[in-house]
Every structure is written in C-alpha cells, then in structure tokens.
Image: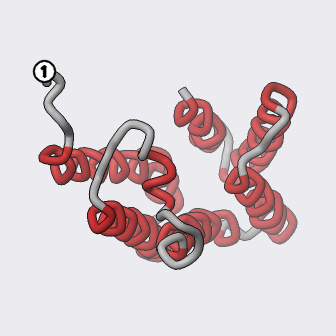
Amino acid sequence: MKQLFEFIPILLFFIAFKLYDFYVATAVVIVATVLQVAYAWIKYRKVETMQWITLGLILVMGGATLYLRDEQFLKWKLSIIEWLFGAAFLGSQFVGKTPFIERMLSASLTLPDVIWKRLNTLWGCFFISVGFINLYVMYNYNTEDWVTFKTFGVPALMVIFIVLQMAFLYKYIPDSEE
C-alpha cells in the first residue's frame, strides 16, 4: 500500500500530461507531493527522510521547470533521486552497523552478512543505473516517451529487478514445513 500511495503523484503527473501539457503536469505533481507529505505528517507525525528529499527536489526542480519554462529541470529530478538512493545504499555499507537492505528486510529474512552486502550493492547499483537510463531516455527520446518511461518504465524495471532478486534469494528462504 505504501508503494501505491507513493505512486499517486507520478500517476497524477501522467494523467495531467496526457490531458494538458508538461507544465500543468509539473504543477500537479508539486501539489500532489506536498499533499502526500502533509498527509504523512498528519497521519503518522513522521515523514521519512527520502520523502523530505523528494519534496525538496520536486519543489526546486519543478519550480525551476515552471519558472524557466524548461522541462529539463524536472526530468533531471528522477536521476538525482535515483543516484541519492544508490549512494545511500552503497554508503550504508561503510556507515552504521548494517547495510540499508538488511535494516529493511532482516525482520522477514535471515541471510549471511556477505549476502546482505551483495544484495545491498545490487540495490545501490540498480538505483544508480536507473538514474543513467533516465538520462539516456531524456536526451534521446521526446518528452512523451520520457513521461511514459518515468510512469511505467521505471516501475517495470523495479519489478523485474525484484523478481531477479527473489530468484537470487530463493535458496536462502527456509522451508515453511520445518
């Protein structure tokens, strides 16, 4: 449900782009992201760090897109966010006691330390790669193709990555019949 909730501004951006244009869609995603963070604060009295970073980037990059009438600012936001995620995952191996992926999944999965580190590195590299793929798409395809990539391509890449990751982890999942 959390991922679906976080997908709402992206979906609203896509719909506004299809119905109007890139600049209306940018305004819609800014408002939707502000409302999303406000909702998280009101409901949980807590907003995750990456939500704050995403909000800050959407306000700055989206604001620059609207003010300067230049789509590139908002298009760059995706790469910046992905690179921040990647850096956070990779950096977590050197800061703190456990990698991010272990902190996120250790309650439901037990793995050897070396596998946690490999998995964490894979996630970090995945996010950094998606940032570079975004640059490729934004500079080699038109805006409509980029919007489709951002809305459907990036989530599809994530699903494929998770399926591959599950295949990698399958041998570490204990039998439920024990």
Task: Please tell me which residue is depicted at 50% across the width and 52% down the height of the picture.
Answer: 103
> Does any portion of residue 141 appear in the rendered image?
no
Q: Looking at the picture, which amino acid does disc 1 mark?
A: Glu
Where is the N terminus found, in terms of image quarters?
A: top right
Task: Please tell me which residue is depicted at 68% across the width and 55% down the height of the picture.
Answer: 50
The type of colouring in the image is secondary structure
| Element marked by disc 1 | loop
Where is the C terminus found, in terms of image quarters?
A: top left
Q: Residues within 10 Å of mark 1 (few under 14, many from 20)?
A: few
Q: Which residue is mark 1?
A: 177
Task: Please tell me which residue is depicted at 12% across the width and 47% down the height of the picture.
Answer: 171
Q: Position of residue 128 (x, y in %)?
A: 45, 72
Q: Position of residue 55 (x, y in %)?
A: 77, 53
In this view, the residue in front, 2 or 120, is 120
Task: Please tell me which residue is depicted at 81% across the width and 68% down the height of the picture.
Answer: 64
Q: Position of residue 12 (x, y in %)?
A: 64, 35
Q: How many marks?
A: 1
> Does any portion of residue 153 appear in the rendered image?
yes
- Is 40 situated left or right of 11 in this image? right
